[in-house]
Image (cartoon, rainbow, N blue to C red):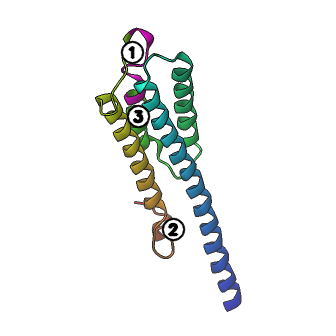
Amino acid sequence: MVAAIGWALTHLLSEARERRKEVRAQIDKLFEQLYKIEQDARSFHCALQFDTAKAGEIDAKIQIFERSINRVPIFLIDDLAPYIIRLRRAVTLRNFDLSAFTPQSQYSDILQDTFAASQDAEDEMERQYRRRYSSTFPFFRMPSLGVWRGKPQA
């Protein structure tokens, strides 16, 4: 009996560790995508002339980023949506069409907003990860006993 309980506990913790590693890898890829979007936006907005291909590429990368977020099972999309909207607006709302384009300095409001929006999105993703996976033992959030007793989880 003790061996069976020990095996079950080991199995539970191993599975939790593997899920945690998979989610962490997904989030790290999102961070890389976010960094690339920010760098491309900086390059685009600082260019001497409007680049239609680069604008389309940035827009596509933002769409891919949004879709990738939906694939991370621990994310609460409703909590992340304002950060994604803010990122998209920071990158594409101003200075993103040919008629209004002007080269930006490294310290322009557009670039500062883009940087802040990407950092805030990253912080929110990390907050959601930490909420789900603790940095202390047992390294994941245990379900409350109310679930096992038929009570709604708080």
Query: Distance of mark 3 from mark 2, alpha carbons?
Result: 30 Å
The x and y percentages for residue 121 are: 41, 44
Q: Nearer the viewer, residue 136 or 65?
A: 65
What distance separates the C-alpha of mark 2 from that of mark 1?
A: 48 Å
Q: Which residue is mark 3?
A: 87
Q: Tell me which residue sits at (46%, 63%) in the image.
A: 151
Q: Residues within 10 Å of mark 3 (few under 14, many from 20)?
A: many
Magenta segment includes 29: no
* Residue under label 1: 101
Q: Amino acid at mark 2?
A: Phe
Earlier in the chain: of badge 1 and badge 3, it is 3
Residue count near mark 2 (Cα–Cα under 10 Å), binned few <14, some 14–19, many ≥20? some
Q: Label 3 sits on what residue type? A: Leu
Residue at position x 56%, y 26% in the image: 57
Specify the segment rendered in magenta. Answer: 90-99
State the SS at label 3. helix
Using the rendered view, name the quadrant where residue 22 is placed.
Answer: bottom right
Query: In the structure shown, which secondary structural element does the residue marked by tag 1 occupy?
Result: loop
Residue 60 falls in image quadrant: top right
